[in-house]
Image (cartoon, helix red, strand yellow):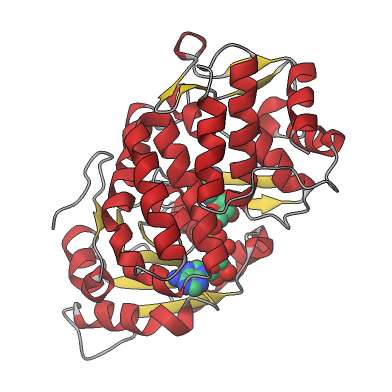
Amino acid sequence: VPSIDLLGYPIVVESGCLARLGSLVGACASAHRYAVVTDDNVAPRYLAPVRDALISASPRATSSDHVQTVVIPPGEEHKTREQWAAITDALLATGCGRDTTIVAVGGGVVGDLAGFVAATYMRGIPVVQVPTTLLAMVDASVGGKTAVDTPAGKNTVGAFHPPAMVVIDPATLATLPPRELRAGFAEVIKHGVIANADEIDAVVHLAPRVLDGIEVPTVLEPLIERSVRIKANVVAADEREQGLRKVLNFGHTIGHGVEAASDYTLLHGEAIAIGMVAESRLAEQAEIAEPGTASAIERVLGDVGLPTRIPREISVDRIFAAMRSDKKQRRGALEYALPKRVGEMAGESTGWGIPINDALAKSVLEELR
Ligand SMILES: NC(=O)c1ccc[n+]([C@@H]2O[C@H](COP(=O)([O-])OP(=O)(O)OC[C@H]3O[C@@H](n4cnc5c(N)ncnc54)[C@H](O)[C@@H]3O)[C@@H](O)[C@H]2O)c1
Ligand SMILES: [Zn+2]
């Protein structure tokens, strides 16, 4: 199987590969039992083929009791310790032991939650990530971060637990709501800004055609493959986020603040789009980015139909309060991952996090409202 092999686990990107999930998993993450974790939106569409593939690849193909299924309610509000408990209870009730591999089929919520279950169940069992949103394909499923949210904040309880394998079938994007698909392009654009300006052109060319239904999502396969490679290369250099991995936070210091201040009415990718516009302007005004960088990024996001302005009802003070409540940003000047130009990040000498005083950041945010 041709796969991306940069992180010690294979990442397969191939349209239609869900039908071969059994043999793919059998080759790279074989287990006595599989526990498929998915959500109520994904289950009606993809659970049957996933189960069939896992059952038919088993040596005991006549019995299906070695493939368990746990279906959770969809949405970020269910990425909780309560759902972690519900899933582990279900696994315990069906007698899943250390010989079980979890197969997470869904978006980043399912991946993060099922990944955290895998990190902790019986002190850790393997997980195969099968992302079905664009965001999860190019971002959440790769890199080994797992977590749940708590009232104190997003991803506040979690673990590093790299998957045994990642299986990406771009054909599953055909059923994803367009708003979710568009939001996923924000992270693809982010990867382009971080590491390869040519990717930006590819997104501008393809994203509107797919969003308008002129092309089917499987045309995105090469784009997804390259985007995953960019993330995997960064993670390979810095799995535990000591340095370089911080570049993946481009757009996220402000983006997370905007996302929280919108009470999560903005999707993550939408908030990150606004965050990238704001942070690239910040980079220019701080004379870190080449002139023209911010307008180029803003144009691309606009071309894809992503928001580039802060909704008027969200105040700059609320955004800042949310940014300050981030666990890593309590003290001192807020730090940002900022571009030097499209395709290259600044900040190597300061460990890729660049402190910027609040006054400058606030003026940029006011400009964007
Ligand atoms: N671990 C990481 O490194 C990492 C990185 C980025 C984001 N994340 C996490 O990912 C989460 C966001 O993930 P997301 O954007 O995938 O959201 P999501 O998991 O909530 O999925 C979005 C929606 O699409 C539905 N859906 C999923 N696949 C579908 C399909 N193929 N067809 C139809 N509907 C489908 C889901 O049920 C959900 O309603 C956040 O919790 C975020 O913290 C984690
Ligand atoms: Zn993100």
Q: Position of residue 316 (x, y in %)?
A: 83, 35
Q: Which of 336 and 238 is in front in this view?
A: 336
**Residue visible at 65% across and 59% down in the picture:** 80
- In the image, farthest residue toward the top: 349
Q: Which of 224 and 76 is in front in this view?
A: 224
Q: Dividing the picture into quarters, in which one does residue 137 lie?
A: bottom left
Nearest the eye: 82 or 155: 155
On screen, residue 178 above or below 140: below
Taking the image as drawn, is residue 293 in sight? yes
Residue 356: x, y in percent? 68, 16
Is 67 displayed left or right of 155 in the figure? left
Rendered location of residue 192, percent (x, y): 40, 37
For the C terminus, the image quarter is top right
**Marker count (numbered):** 0
Q: Is residue 41 above or below residue 232?
A: below
Q: Is residue 85 left or right of residue 360?
A: left
Q: Is residue 66 visible?
A: no
- Residue at 30%, 41% in the rendered image: 229
Left or right of residue 14, residue 138 in this image: right
Q: Residue furthest bottom?
A: 62
* Rendering coords of residue 6 (x, y %): 25, 39
- Quadrant of the image containing the N terminus: bottom left
Taking the image as shown, residue 179 lies to the left or right of residue 321, namely left
Residue located 86% across and 34% down the image: 317
* Most foreground residue, 15 or 313: 313
38, above or below 309, in the image: below
